[in-house]
Image: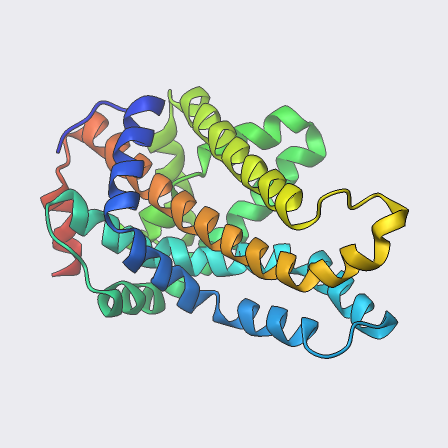
């Protein structure tokens, strides 16, 4: 499977792989999200009172940070699955999770350095922050597949994304729109007229179900985003270096 890098090509290949492996990729992401799921379920158990509402607010406030951390593991695990799929093979759930475990701490270090670099860019101005984010977009995949060290992964990602930051921004914008759209659908279905004081009690009763459904949305977005990042990495390598999926897969042999 050889492609020149472009938004349409990444989306087409990414969605094809994601849909083809929907159940295993969703299961892998769900297993990795287990700590968040357990936390969310524990928060909404029991009678809904002011104390329970505070716990729900805390969950809503801090869960985004937990999701970012868990998505590092998801990205490492699904990168293996995507590479196997690109060369026409199916990776087992166990093999994907094992890969994520083996590379978790190096990938975590790369992610933290990337976050610091992006934060520094945003402190300067919004545009530099976006540029840095796009520049380091495939640093996780570099860490998993090339293992060049923490700083080496950032430099390698900068090298691979050179000349394609605009396309990567467009890809991220589309993925952001998908996430935003799913959020709005969940809110519209689960919390209709949430701002209406006349149905405040009814809205409160819907909050636990809303949280469950929104966790499913987070799992969907997390798995899809990880697949797109892995496909982006492959297509950048393929275009710039002629690297095939079979060559990428040799790192796991």
- Asked if residue 13 lies left or right of residue 199, the reply is left
Q: Residue lying furthest bottom in this view?
A: 46
How does the figure colour the protein chain or chains? rainbow
Quarter where residue 247 is shown: top left
Tell me the quarter of the image containing the N terminus.
top left
User: Within the image, what quadrant is residue 17 found in?
Assistant: top left
Residue 184: % across, % down: 62, 39
Name which residue lies at 30% across and 45% down. Answer: 18
Location of residue 92 in the rendering, given as x and y in whole percent from the top left corner: 20, 64
Q: What x and y, as percent, mark residue 128? A: 60, 27
Can residue 131 be seen in this snapshot? yes
Q: Going 70% across and 30% down the picture, which residue do you hit?
A: 124
Instruction: Tell me the residue at 28%/59% (across/down).
Output: 24
Residue 103: image x %, image y %? 34, 63
Residue 178 appears left or right of 237: right
- Work out whether residue 6 can be spotted: no
Residue 162 lies, with reference to residue 151, above or below; the image says above
Which residue ends up furthest to the right in the rendered image? 197
Q: Is residue 88 left or right of residue 98?
A: left
**Quarter assignment of residue 144:** bottom left
């Amino acid at each position: 499977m050889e492609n020149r890098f472009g938004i349409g090509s990444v989306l087409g290949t990414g969605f094809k792989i994601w849909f083809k492996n929907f159940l295993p990729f969703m299961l892998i992401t769900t297993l990795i999200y287990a700590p968040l799921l357990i936390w969310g379920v524990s928060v909404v158990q029991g009678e809904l009172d002011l104390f329970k509402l505070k716990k729900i607010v805390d969950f809503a406030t801090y869960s985004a940070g937990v999701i970012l951390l868990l998505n590092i593991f998801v990205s490492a695990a699904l990168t293996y699955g995507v590479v196997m799929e690109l060369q026409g093979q199916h990776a087992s759930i166990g093999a994907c999770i094992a890969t994520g475990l083996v590379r978790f701490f190096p990938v975590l270090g790369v992610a933290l350095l990337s976050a610091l670099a992006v934060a520094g860019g945003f402190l300067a101005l919004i545009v530099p922050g976006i540029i840095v984010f796009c520049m380091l977009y495939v640093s996780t995949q570099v860490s998993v597949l090339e293992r060049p060290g923490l700083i080496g992964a950032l430099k390698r990602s900068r090298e691979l994304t050179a000349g394609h930051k605009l396309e990567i921004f467009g890809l991220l914008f589309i993925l952001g729109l998908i996430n935003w759209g799913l959020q709005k659908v969940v809110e519209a279905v689960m919390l209709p007229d949430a701002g209406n004081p006349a149905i405040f009690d009814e809205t409160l009763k819907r909050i636990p179900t809303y949280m469950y459904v929104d966790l499913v949305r987070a799992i969907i977005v997390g798995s899809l985003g990880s697949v797109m990042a892995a496909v982006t990495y492959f297509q950048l390598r393929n275009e710039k270096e002629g690297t095939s999926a079979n060559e990428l897969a040799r790192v796991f042999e």
